[in-house]
């Protein structure tokens, strides 16, 4: 096997030693072993799709974060940090922490008490079959595209760093994911995600540590970046007063309202990829603690993702460029930041672990997408629209097959992303299409009992169509950017933020207007689904230090501190 | 935290850290006594030695603590 792998590589950034290859092969063997070990515990639908609803808060919480920590998170945001500076950290702090805490404290009780198996499943209970069909189809579409992004990111790493053939990388890694998810279902995906989370940290943590040693600490890093004429790259908020003052071309309103209020709340509270992990928790308190645990680790992720991007600005001798330009000139693209930094600092063994971390990131992201796709496809599309009365065993079998088919479709989408100059811009575009309007529908459904089934459906449809419409408008007429993003100088990221904001507002507006002229459901039909008619279990007998509220406050204080420190 | 089966997920993690740590530590020691011609930046820090040892120690701790035993599930 080692000789086979060694024979495949050609031109490459680094040369793997035998030890490195052993570490990579050991990782593949371990994730497959977990899949085979858990095979016998995924025979019912509840086991296969919901992991038996018996995960502890820690496992659900780490899995919740790990499913999000795919290779595009690692590579894409490291590249974004090189491109946009520390502004990229907004996607980890204001773009994640408030939303994760909101999910834990406000939304989780409704998801959990309703005993839904998915977010589209909740929409079915709250708004009816039409909303479920719309959200499940758009989610399935988005998920396989996201899976393709992860696959492309991973194949790119292995091509650049190891010189491995892209097809070989894609087939081996995606087949491994397909095997362990189809064998053990969500439980296998979750267990492997926890393992992958630890490996990502073990493999990636050395880059910022060694980078800071080389740069002379944070002050040395700032000084080097300033020498390169990029003084605004190390400030989180102070450059957001005007569109032209920061490398992202964004105003603080776009970050606060577009990212912080819409995109992040939409992603962290309604994207079933992450919510599914929390739904597998063993009880409501574990389900509420899981996102809080995830939030505390999420706050630390910039140390292994954003900081390496900044360090690359300071220490790498070459200048990185957009993907298309790199392909044309033979240079290195933004997305190659992490591999380049790995090659810079990591010798035999460490390099293998670093590559394993990137592969683990790819697999956790892909397994997250695939297991979520499988559940939505089987329960919300296949069972709801195609075959309503089959046995539980039939749906489990469909789940296993749809895992394999979902992976196969994802492979086809991997090549689509190569036309985008930055992977993360592409991801944000997808979020603004589907996630932002979905958040409008779900939040109104949970907090406003007057929202009607017709209002939910038409609001969701209008939000999604308007988002895609705004995207197409700017593509056809770039001058439209001044209307969509409020400035002709706005960059792709800023455009995505504002498009998400408008599509959410349109969704909410249409939902409210249609609801006010149509008949609402009775209160008895809304019990367990909506605020005001749902009894939330009391935590009065639980010690303060075990209450979700207490830890949410601790995380909130840390969140404020990091924003002030890097202001 | 055994969630999901007889063997805890944390034991799998312990095994992974222990094996990887030992391999990295071994590679670091070999490199220390046989320095390569092409060296990475900050080679003199010998990160693979101390990082490998740290991972191995952590992994060993996990393996001992979460090993399946009679009377404990």
Image (tube, grey):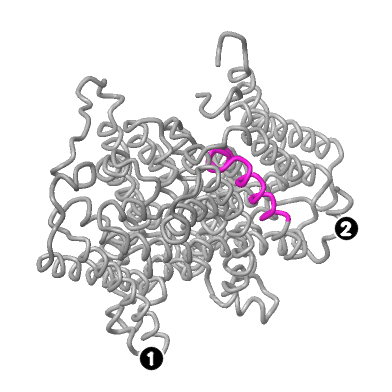
- Give the quarter of the figure containing the C terminus of chain A: bottom left
The answer to which of A204 and B39 lies nearer the viewer is A204
Q: Quadrant of residue A495?
A: bottom left
The answer to which of A242 and A452 lies nearer the viewer is A452
Q: Quadrant of residue A169?
A: bottom right
Q: Is residue A315 visible?
A: no
Q: What residue is drawn where x is 47% and y is 62%?
A: A140
Q: What residue is drawn where x is 69% and y is 53%?
A: A175
Residue A265 position in % (x across, y down): 31, 55
| Main SS class of the magenta portion in the image | helix
- Looking at the picture, does residue A104 appear above or below residue B6? below
- Looking at the picture, does residue A65 appear above or below residue B72? below
Q: Which disc is residue A477 wearing?
A: 1
Q: CA distance from mark 2 to mark 1?
A: 49 Å
The answer to which of A241 and A296 lies nearer the viewer is A296
The answer to which of A407 and A424 lies nearer the viewer is A407
Residue A530 position in % (x across, y down): 20, 47
- The kind of secondary structure element at disc 2 is helix
Graded by Cα atoms within 10 Å as few (under 14), some (14 to 19) or many (20 or more), the crowding at tag 2 reads few
Residue B35 position in % (x across, y down): 84, 43
**Is A91 placed left or right of A357 in the picture?**
left
- Looking at the picture, does residue A275 appear above or below residue A429? above
**Is A126 placed left or right of A415 in the picture?**
left
Graded by Cα atoms within 10 Å as few (under 14), some (14 to 19) or many (20 or more), the crowding at tag 1 reads few
Q: Which residue is mark 2?
A: A7
For disc 1, the chain is A
Residue A78 position in % (x across, y down): 53, 59
Q: Which residues are magenta?
A: A172-192
**Is A184 a magenta residue?**
yes
């Amino acid at each position: 096997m080692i000789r086979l792998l060694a024979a495949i590589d050609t031109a490459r950034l680094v040369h793997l030693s035998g030890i490195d290859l052993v570490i990579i092969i050991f990782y593949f063997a371990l994730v497959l072993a977990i899949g085979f070990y858990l095979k016998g515990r995924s025979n019912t639908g509840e086991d296969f799709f919901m992991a038996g609803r018996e995960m502890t808060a820690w496992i659900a919480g780490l899995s919740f974060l790990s499913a999000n920590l795919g290779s595009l998170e690692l590579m894409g945001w490291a590249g974004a940090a090189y491109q946009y500076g520390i502004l990229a950290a907004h996607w980890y702090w204001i773009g994640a922490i408030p939303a994760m805490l909101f999910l834990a404290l406000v939304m989780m009780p409704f998801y959990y008490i309703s005993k839904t198996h998915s977010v589209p499943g909740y929409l079915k209970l709250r708004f009816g079959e039409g909303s479920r069909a719309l959200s499940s189809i758009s989610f399935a579409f988005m998920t396989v595209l996201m899976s393709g992004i992860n696959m492309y990111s991973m194949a790119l790493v292995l091509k650049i760093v190891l010189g491995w053939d892209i097809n070989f990388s894609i087939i081996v890694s995606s087949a491994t994911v397909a095997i362990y998810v189809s064998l053990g279902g969500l439980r296998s995906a979750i267990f492997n995600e926890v393992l992958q989370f630890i490996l990502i940290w073990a493999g990636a943590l050395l880059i910022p540590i060694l980078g800071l040693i080389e740069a002379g600490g944070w002050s040395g890093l700032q000084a080097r970046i300033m020498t390169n004429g990029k003084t605004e790259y190390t400030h989180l908020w102070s450059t957001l007063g005007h569109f032209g003052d920061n490398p992202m071309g964004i105003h603080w309103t776009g970050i606060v309202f577009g990212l912080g209020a819409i995109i992040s709340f939409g992603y962290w509270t309604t994207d079933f990829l992450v919510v599914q992990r929390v739904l597998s928790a063993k009880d409501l308190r574990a389900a509420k603690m899981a996102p809080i645990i995830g939030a505390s680790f999420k706050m630390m992720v910039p140390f292994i993702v954003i900081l390496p991007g900044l360090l690359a600005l300071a220490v790498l001798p070459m200048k990185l460029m957009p993907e298309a330009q790199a392909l044309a000139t033979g240079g290195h693209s933004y997305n190659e930041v992490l591999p380049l930094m790995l090659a810079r600092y990591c010798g035999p063994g460490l390099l293998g672990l670093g590559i394993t971390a990137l592969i683990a990131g790819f697999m956790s992201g892909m397994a997250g997408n695939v297991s979520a796709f499988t559940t939505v496809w089987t329960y919300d599309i296949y069972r709801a629209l195609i075959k309503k009365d089959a046995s539980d065993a039939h749906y489990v079998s469909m789940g296993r097959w749809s895992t394999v088919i979902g992976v196969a479709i994802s492979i086809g989408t991997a090549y689509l992303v190569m036309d985008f100059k930055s992977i993360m811009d592409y991801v944000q575009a997808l979020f603004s299409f589907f996630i932002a309007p979905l958040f409008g529908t779900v939040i109104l459904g949970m907090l406003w009992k007057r929202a009607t089934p017709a209002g939910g459906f038409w609001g969701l449809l209008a939000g999604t169509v308007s988002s895609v419409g705004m995207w197409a408008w700017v593509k056809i007429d770039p001058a439209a950017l001044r209307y969509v993003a409020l400035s002709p100088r706005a960059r792709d990221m800023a455009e995505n933020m504002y498009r998400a904001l408008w599509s959410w507002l349109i969704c909410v507006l249409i939902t409210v207007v249609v609801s006010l002229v149509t008949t609402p459901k009775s209160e008895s039909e809304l019990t367990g689904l909506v605020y005001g008619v749902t009894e939330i279990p009391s935590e009065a007998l639980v010690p303060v230090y075990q209450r979700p509220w207490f830890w949410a406050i601790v995380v909130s204080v840390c969140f404020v501190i990091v924003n002030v420190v890097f202001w | 935290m055994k969630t999901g089966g007889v063997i805890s997920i944390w034991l799998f993690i312990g095994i992974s850290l222990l094996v990887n740590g030992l391999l990295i530590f071994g590679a670091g020691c070999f490199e220390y006594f046989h320095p390569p011609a092409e060296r990475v930046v900050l080679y003199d820090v010998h990160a693979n030695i101390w990082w490998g040892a740290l991972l191995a120690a952590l992994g060993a701790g996990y393996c001992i603590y979460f090993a399946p035993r009679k009377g404990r599930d």
